[in-house]
């Protein structure tokens, strides 16, 4: 399934996927301004419809993954892996040497996903995510 650069026209569907998969989803405005300030975005398309996305900030030699999600209907089918492969590919082209991210400590699926790409656990950030109770973040990174 093709991967394309994210554009403003994709944001409605991205917002919907984020709302359905993220316990603290971004607002539409946050997604829009993230693109506008120059963060990088990729979408995964099926029949011209967005079924997954990844957003990352790059300041060589480091890159930070801001958000990555796949429509529930298409999870577990390799779509997230394809997106992350492209994030790695673009990062390498930008001479990035290290990729980091935060993930909810109880999000074992995503933690496994990142581990399958060689990410390792660096630290825990206490009560990083909003909610009641708040949830800790696991900081992960990999050298590329
Ligand atoms: C995390 C996410 C992006 C992974 O995308 P995906 O398309 O479902 O994952 P893939 O099919 O590419 O699987 C890649 C690896 O992830 C792990 N994984 C996927 N589904 C899993 C599950 N149900 N349980 C445990 N590990 C799982 C496995 O290591 C898998 O590798 P394998 O197929 O060789 O076993 C996706 O599940 C998602 O959108 N989750 C909700 C949003 C989210 O948590 N984003 C991360 C925020 S930090």
Image: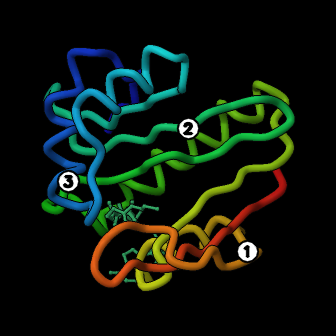
- The secondary element bearing badge 1 is classed as strand
Residue at the (26%, 66%) spot, across then down: 23
Q: Is mark 1 within 8 Å of ligand 1?
A: no
Residue at the (82%, 30%) spot, across then down: 60
Residue 1 or 118: which is nearer the viewer?
A: 118
The residue where tag 1 is placed is 120
Label 2 environment density (alpha carbons within 10 Å; few <14, some 14–19, many ≥20)? many
Quadrant of the image where one finds ligand 1: bottom left
- Disc nearer the start of the sequence (1/3): 3
Q: Is mark 3 within 8 Å of ligand 1?
A: yes
Asked if residue 143 lies left or right of residue 13, the reply is right
Asked if residue 47 lies left or right of residue 81, the reply is left
The residue where tag 3 is placed is 71
Residue 15 percent location from the top left of the image: 20, 39
The residue where tag 2 is placed is 56
Colour setting: rainbow
């Amino acid at each position: 399934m093709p991967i394309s650069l994210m554009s403003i026209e994709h944001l409605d569907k991205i917002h919907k996927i984020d709302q359905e998969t993220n316990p603290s989803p971004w607002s539409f405005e946050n997604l829009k301004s993230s693109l506008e300030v120059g963060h990088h975005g990729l979408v995964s398309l099926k029949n011209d419809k967005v079924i997954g996305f990844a957003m990352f900030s790059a300041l060589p030699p480091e890159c930070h993954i801001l958000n990555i999600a796949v429509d529930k209907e298409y999870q577990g089918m390799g779509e997230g892996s394809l997106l992350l492969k492209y994030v790695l590919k673009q990062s390498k082209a930008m001479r990035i040497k290290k990729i980091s991210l935060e993930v909810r400590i109880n999000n074992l699926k995503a933690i496994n996903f990142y581990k399958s790409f060689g990410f390792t656990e660096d630290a825990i950030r206490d009560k990083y995510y909003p909610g009641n109770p708040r949830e800790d973040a696991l900081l992960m990174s990999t050298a590329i």
